[in-house]
Amino acid sequence: MTLVFFLFGFLLSSITSHDSARDFCVADLKGAQTTVGYPCKLPKDVTVEDFLFSNFKAGTLNQFNFSFTSATVDNFPALNGLGFSLAKAEIEEGATIPMHSHADATEIVIAGSGPAKYTTGFITSDNVVYMKTLSEGDIFVIPKGLLHFGINSGKGKASGLTIFSSEKPSIQVLDLALFGNNLDSAIVEKTTFLDAAQVKKLKTLFKGSG
Ligand SMILES: *[C@@H]1O[C@H](CO)[C@@H](O)[C@H](O)[C@H]1NC(C)=O
């Protein structure tokens, strides 16, 4: 009899208590971030605003003449533990998103509307190039970890929406890895076969030293 009451009470409490702690782990951005993400906000502190990202549009132009906004766990706490994030890019006519890679995320590119052409491609670890000019409505996949790029190969602005298989993808830009740090110029020259003047010019452009 006691057992029946106990089970009934248990069932009732699991129906009536909203156990949303099992449904999501909205990031407590003030908490310490670990390899598995942020700690969860207490369910009572979660609001609908945590699940909403407003005004998702490309930001200001950078030195490559493209603008970029990303919605990752750092500014969209509901993504915590869910394993994906998004970005939006707008590339000026003739401009390029430079060669870069995301070690921990596959990227899906959805071509934007308009007459501009968005050409994208990736290079495999055995250096085969897969490259495609996308039309409106096309979706292209860039497998995890591979170097890839984007080019506006048409007239006007080109835009694209990207989805990453990580809530906080890493980004390594090849130009910055080579020329945007204090790696000794002599080593950069040796490993790239560029001459000293070219390395100096690129170190200046990408704010490197050494
Ligand atoms: C960016 O655009 C400006 C203005 O059109 C142009 O002068 C400059 O060369 C462009 N830079 C790149 C990297 O495309």
Image (cartoon, rainbow, N blue to C red):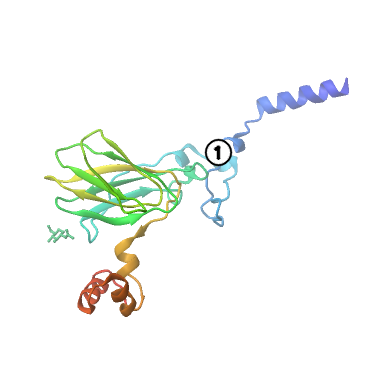
Q: Nearer the viewer, residue 115 or 61?
A: 115
Quarter of image, res 4:
top right
Q: What is the residue that sits farthest to the front in this orientation?
A: 126
Element carrying mark 1: loop
Quarter holding ligand 1: bottom left
Question: Residue 156, image x and y in percent?
Answer: 13, 45
Q: Nearer the viewer, residue 86 or 192?
A: 192
At horizontal 37% and vertical 53% (from top left) the residue drawn is 125
Quarter of image, res 45:
top right
Q: Nearer the viewer, residue 65 or 15?
A: 65
Quarter of image, res 98:
bottom left
At horizontal 63% and vertical 33% (from top left) the residue drawn is 19
Q: Which residue is mark 1?
A: 24
Is the residue indicated by label 1 positioned so its CB lies within 8 Å of ligand 1?
A: no
Viewport quadrant of the C terminus: bottom left
At horizontal 45% and vertical 40% (from top left) the residue drawn is 49
